[in-house]
Amino acid sequence: MPVIVMASPKGGVGKSTCAVLLASEFARMGADVTVLDCDPNKSLTRWASHGAPSGVILKSDVGRSEIVPTIRSSDGDGKIVIVDLEGVASQLVSRAISQADLVIVPMQPTALDAEIGSEALALVREEEEALGRSIRHAVVLTKTSAAVKSRVQKELEAQLSGAGIDVIQPSLVARAAFSELFAYGGDLTAMMGDPEMVTGGKIDKALANAQAFTEAVYERLK
Amino acid sequence: MSGSNRLAGLKARPKGTTVEEVRRVDEVGEARGFLDRTPRKKPGRKPSPRTHQLHPKVFPTVGQEISAEAERLGITQGQLIEEMWSVYKDKH
């Protein structure tokens, strides 16, 4: 089963949020999901400490030396492996990319994110060349506006598409519920069913966005 | 989107995990600035475990006297300090 790697040398772009949303949605579909938290900030470990959804197993503190064997040992029938990487340019990142069936590069629609994120895209292409096989990769725009698509976002999407880069639609909208997942743990459906949880946002819209995003990722793994 | 039957259609491609392939990946990464950033271990000897051993700081002359007395009695300086402590406790 596939290995999905979240990669960008820039921090704060939404790698961990993408990982949590995909892990919880694929688990809801019935997959056994193993999430590898390779980020020293341990965002996913914090999320899981509040309660990971059923079907999700978390492995923390996976470093450069362990990444390849850990992905290999976690892979298996009916299992999806999701790797959340640190937001730096490191050998851990390059090694994880080499084991991916799909590399997702999250980017906020800003020039800085695009410039730094493009380093990850370039690395994927160079690894493809060095290994003599293709590594599927795609960009997802994150923290986008729910109301309107900004001019910068439109331009960035056009530039990425023009360069032949796969852009996942829909983008991930800036939703309070996505951030609150790290405070409450679990998934968005649990959040919706618990009146005690206060997000200050629309959980149903966040859930619809997460499901559409997961569906788009699923289509790329077939 | 629901049902594990859909997940059965997901594919994983074979990936290389040999030492040679990992070395090639490292080389490509390093050329682009993706370096080994594993935190280095703190250099030097690790602190000794606590043994509750005393390390009294005294004037050099006093230290020499304690050392000489312990040697004369054929005991360790620690044993001599234990005797001193016993006398001190009786006194107070």
Image (spheres, rainbow, N blue to C red):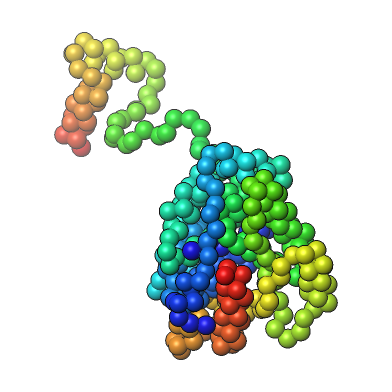
Residue A186 visible in rendering:
no
Q: Is residue A49 left or right of residue A200?
A: left
Image quadrant holding the C terminus of chain A, namely bottom right
Q: Quadrant of residue A122?
A: bottom right
The extreme left residue here reads: B90
Residue A218 vertical position relative to residue B37 in the rendered view, above or below: below
Residue B56 percent location from the top left of the image: 34, 28
Count of marks, rendered view: 0
Viewer-proximal residue, B63 or B43?
Answer: B43
Residue appearing at x 45%, y 58% in the figure = A75
Q: Quadrant of residue A178?
A: bottom right
Residue A197 percent location from the top left of the image: 48, 83
Residue appearing at x 54%, y 71% in the figure = A22
Viewer-proximal residue, B59 or A114?
Answer: A114
Residue appearing at x 63%, y 57% in the figure = A135
Residue B78 vertical position relative to residue A173 in the rendered view, above or below: above
Residue B89 percent location from the top left of the image: 19, 35
Residue B47 vertical position relative to residue A107 in the rendered view, above or below: above
Residue appearing at x 67%, y 78% in the figure = A170
Residue A210 vertical position relative to residue A193 in the rendered view, above or below: above
Viewer-proximal residue, B8 or B1?
Answer: B8
Q: Is residue A85 left or right of residue B29?
A: left
Q: Is residue B65 left or right of residue A97?
A: left
Residue A22 visible in rendering:
yes
Residue A19 percent location from the top left of the image: 55, 67
